[in-house]
Amino acid sequence: MIGQLTLPFRLLVACIYLFLLAPILIVLPLSFSNDSYITFPPESWGLRWYAAMFSHAGFAQALWISFVIAITVTILGLAAGVPAAFAIRRRQFIGREFLLNLFTAPLLLPSIVLGLAILLVFVQARLLGTYTGLIIAHLIITTPYVIRIMLTAFSTLPPSVEDAATMLGASPFTVVRRITLPLMMPGFIASAALSFLLSFDEVVISLFITGPRLRTLPVEIFDYVESQTDPMTAAVSVVLVAATLLIIFLIERTLGLSKTIGK
Amino acid sequence: MQTQELRQVIPAAETNTGDQAFLKLKGITKRYGVDYMAVDDLDIDVPKGKLLGLLGPSGCGKTTTLRMIAGLLDITRSKITIDGDDISHKPPHKRDIGLVFQNYALFPHMTVAQNVAFGLEMRGVGRVEARDRVEEALEMVRLPGYGERKPKEMSGGQQQRVALARALVIRPRLLLLDEPLSNLDAKLRDDMRIEIREIQQRLQITTVFVTHDQVEALTMCDLVGVMHKGKLAQLGTPEDIYERPADLFVADFVGRTNILDGEIEALDRVRIGASVYPCNTRGLTSGKAKAAIRPHRISLTPSRDRSLVSMATNAAHGKVTRVTYIGDVVQYDIDIGGNTLTTEVHTASAGHSFQSGEKLLCEWKPQDMQVFAQGSGN
Ligand SMILES: Nc1ncnc2c1ncn2[C@@H]1O[C@H](COP(=O)(O)OP(=O)(O)OP(=O)(O)O)[C@@H](O)[C@H]1O
Ligand SMILES: [Mg+2]
């Protein structure tokens, strides 16, 4: 297949890859700079900023906060999204279409609009700068993705296998446990990974609602870049990219990524 | 020896209780929405150990009927009993019915052996016994040693046999098959037809077989129910259905048939065009009618004088308008003065072959010409 591509097309593909990877290609060398401020290419090399990052109290704490929030959001998002997708796909009820559209509408709204709306509501509800507030805000972003992915997972379930299990004597609960859940596992893993990464990565909405004592890592980085111009943020970025790649690598290894994201 | 072992997989049901109904469907009805009758008041009895074919065009309600028997679909109204046991309101997983789906529906995340063992596991059969029964069931469908494969590593025909083994290994009281052969190629379909029939007869398992293929229905089944728009048009032996269709729909749907417009002149007399033919009007004595004649029941001879033909035979002069070679038969379309008759001659027995434009004489027996009132069975 690849062998048949024409030269201009290959060049185009190469350019697109270059464009997508350009930030990493610059950030990676930059993170190994020993300079006190950002210059490219760096004048001196070393691990100074990696060391600085790990001893920087703000980053370490923000990393932990982001991690806790992302895990919580992932679990709650699956708990809400999976039954929602199940009901929308399997049950007939009035307002089904409406609910589907409502649940997936946040996918279409610009995050800045969403952020502002959340801010207005959270001021009233005194949720600004709290774990609860951040988790709710992130759930608003991640749950539509979970619902979408699980809807796809439900519809790619081979037809009649559940009925076949029923006819062989499996009770409804056993059918779900032995047939439905195992076949939907790729969908679960894809939604979990995506929720985690979306929450861990989220910056726009978090900017609106984080407070001085509760800052997620992306917000911390954002603030840091605004006030400082040293290469520490490059080191932080490289660590984040590496962590993301690790997660994707693990999924790929255990399941095959193409299988979870869909073909 | 082989047969002896197979008997153990599913012991032949206790001695056949003759023609007494084993599966009884009474007034089976499924309504969708307010007034769409997908299945309308079906009454069918199937004797123990018999194979019933449900035959009908697409959308006539065959699958709906099967799913109601299985319990996968709520019945609007009706009663289903198996061996005197009313199962109308039993949940499907307690009905003890084996079902083979059109798309096989094997569990893709399990091996063939795990697929076949699933029903045994649900019944709490011990591991050792289950393993033996799975192996025997796979032998029965001629797939010994395939247990460790995944379904996707098998061909369509093999998957189909796994599905059959999976349904049979639980020794169900009733076996339901929903167009199990429709995804297979012609050759495999012929083989599987014989294989399924053989297993069904050996195990004496009462079976309902859904198909839209009349050859399957006629060749495999003890009884055929022809369905039309949710209703049972006719229930009978394959011979009944083919030789004595109850209405025009059955005559037209089962087998190839010439349908000619005519008018009944008197009992067993029909006028078609300018001629009046002796026929079977099935008790009708007047009115507009449709006459049905099977293509292969018409014999062809080179044109000769009508007076030389026995008066007991119907005859019509005609001219060949088209010759179609189909392999084992040659099809001649013959214009008999306004109407076209399609006829078939076996290539092996064809003493004479005709050319397009040639004049000839068509002959058929009066009892092979069935006449139905216009509009019957629509
Ligand atoms: N859920 C449903 N809601 C409304 N109508 C339905 C539903 N399911 C089936 N039908 C209708 O009921 C009729 C019978 O459907 P069924 O699936 O039993 O047909 P079938 O005889 O099995 O056809 P085929 O040979 O194509 O499989 C069809 O006209 C179909 O459109
Ligand atoms: Mg069907």
Image (tube, coloured by chain):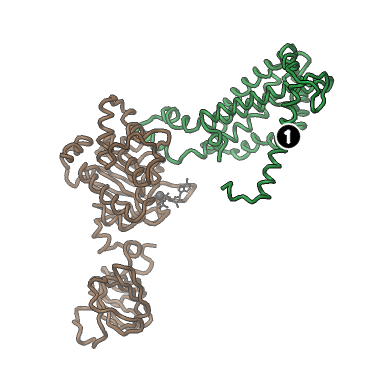
Chain colours: A green, B brown
Q: Position of residue A52 (x, y in %)?
A: 75, 14
| Amino acid at dot 1 | Ala
Query: Which quarter of the rendered picture does the N terminus of chain B lie within?
Result: top left
Q: Residue at x 34, y 56 (%)?
A: B186
Q: Is residue B169 left or right of residue A133?
A: left
> In this image, B241 relative to A253: left or right?
left
The answer as to whether callout 1 falls within 8 Å of ligand 1 is no
> Residue A112: x percent and y percent?
77, 31
On the picture, is A231 further left or further right than A169? right
Callout 1: few (<14), some (14-19), or many (20+) C-alpha neighbours within 10 Å? Answer: few
Q: Is residue B256 above or below residue B192?
A: below
Image point 19% across, 78% down: which residue? B312
In depth, the one of B72 and B300 nearer the eye is B300
* SS of the residue under disc 1: helix
Q: Is residue A223 visible?
A: no
In which quadrant of the rendered image does the C terminus of chain B lie? bottom left
Give the residue at x 24% y 87%.
Answer: B304
Splitting the image into 4 quarters, where does residue B199 fall?
A: top left
